[in-house]
Amino acid sequence: MKWHEITISTTEEAQEMISNFLHELGAGGVSIEESGTLSKQRDTSLGQWYELPLNDIPEGQAIIKGYFNQDTDMEELIASIRPRVEELREFDIDPGTVEYSALVIDEEDWATAWKQYFKPLRISETLTIKPTWEVYEAGPNERIIELDPGMAFGTGTHPTTALCLQTLETVIRGGEEMIDVGTGSGILAIGACRLGVKNVLALDLDPVAVSSATENVKLNELSEQVEVRLSDLLGVIKEGQSGEAGGSAPLTTAVKVPVDLVVANILAEIILLFVDDVYEALKPNGIYIASGIYKNKEDDVEEGLIRSGFEIVEKRRDEDWIAFIARKPQVT
Ligand SMILES: C[S@@+](CC[C@H](N)C(=O)[O-])C[C@H]1O[C@@H](n2cnc3c(N)ncnc32)[C@H](O)[C@@H]1O
């Protein structure tokens, strides 16, 4: 079988949004390559290892490749993605001078083309993300997240995901109940369970993410602990129903709201839409990890969290991305 490969060169700043667009348009896989110039220092503090050779992509730039089945009209696809990319400028996200190209490749090339970018990755003190197709022997005290991200976002290679997993590792004490909003591949829900969380309600608006997360939860033998549901933000809880089209099945999850912990790795614009709902969904002293925030939105998110009643415990940074750790105060 043949596949169409679209290549988009853009900025690191815009890569997440553009790769999300490709997923939404039905990409069968998306890969991102960032600048890896020879002068770039690679972080090995947590024992990370890198298989990819350094490349000549200029600092701050990224190359995104998306793979579409042979029936896709690529001219139409590029025409539909162009205005969405340009619109990013209105959200203060600069995609730079964007270049698009497309070519046809064989299935075999496609499989290796995107999988070669996804290798076992030590992401925090104890967590390692392992692609299902890689052979990897865990060391002592190493906790493995088995993952086949398929078409959903969340391989752990993006700074926002890494920030969430590293933060989860520091806030989880064991036995918590958690909600993961925008679960994507389910990576944070699975990572949280590996770190000791008791139960997770994992939500996503995108049916492709819901099925990817469900598969990954099964793969990690966590179906008893993690319930994955289609939901627009916390809608499924508010309605007390499943978000499945036409469905009204009640939640079967062991997670009882209010919960101890909420994590959301979504863009700042979306985070700001439901801060009050997260506050409601948390127990007093409950923790909210809000990630996916690009540096130009730091102040807006901080103000939004404080306005809803949260205390800011800490802000963590990776490259230009920020994750907030916020606490719902104990009511006296
Ligand atoms: C940046 S990805 C994060 C995936 C994963 N949690 C991670 O940390 O890598 C954001 C996810 O949020 C989902 N999302 C976007 N808007 C949403 C909404 N209104 N309600 C629920 N999920 C949403 C997207 O479908 C996507 O899977």
Image (spheres, rainbow, N blue to C red):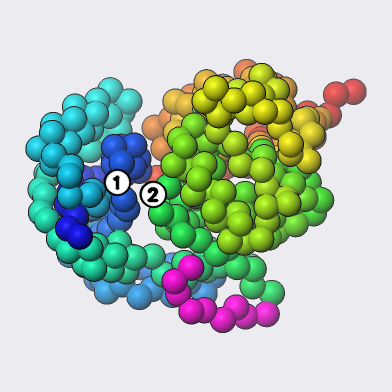
For the residue pair 135 and 59, the one nearer the viewer reads as 135
Name which residue type carries label 2.
Answer: Met
Quickly name the residue at label 2: 151
Q: Is residue 47 above or below residue 229?
A: below
User: Which quarter of the picture shows residue 75?
Assistant: top left
What is the quadrant of the N terminus in the image? bottom left
For the residue pair 158 and 315, the one nearer the viewer reads as 158
Local secondary structure at mark 2:
loop
User: Quick check: 296 left or right of 186?
Assistant: left
Image location (x, y in percent) of residue 43: 44, 67
Examine the residues drawn in magenta and state their main secondary structure: loop
The numbered dot on residue 27 is: 1
Q: Are marks 2 and 1 in contact (CB under 8 Å)?
A: yes
How far apart marks 2 and 1 lie (CA) works out to 7 Å
User: Quick check: 27 left or right of 278?
Assistant: left
State yes or no: residue 300 in magenta: no
Magenta stretch: give its range. 132-140
User: Which quarter of the picture shows residue 73?
Assistant: top left
Residue 291 visible in rendering: no
Instruction: Bin the neighbour count of mark 1 within 10 Å (Cα to Cα): few under 14, some 14-19, many 20 and up.
Output: many
For the residue pair 302 and 190, the one nearer the viewer reads as 190
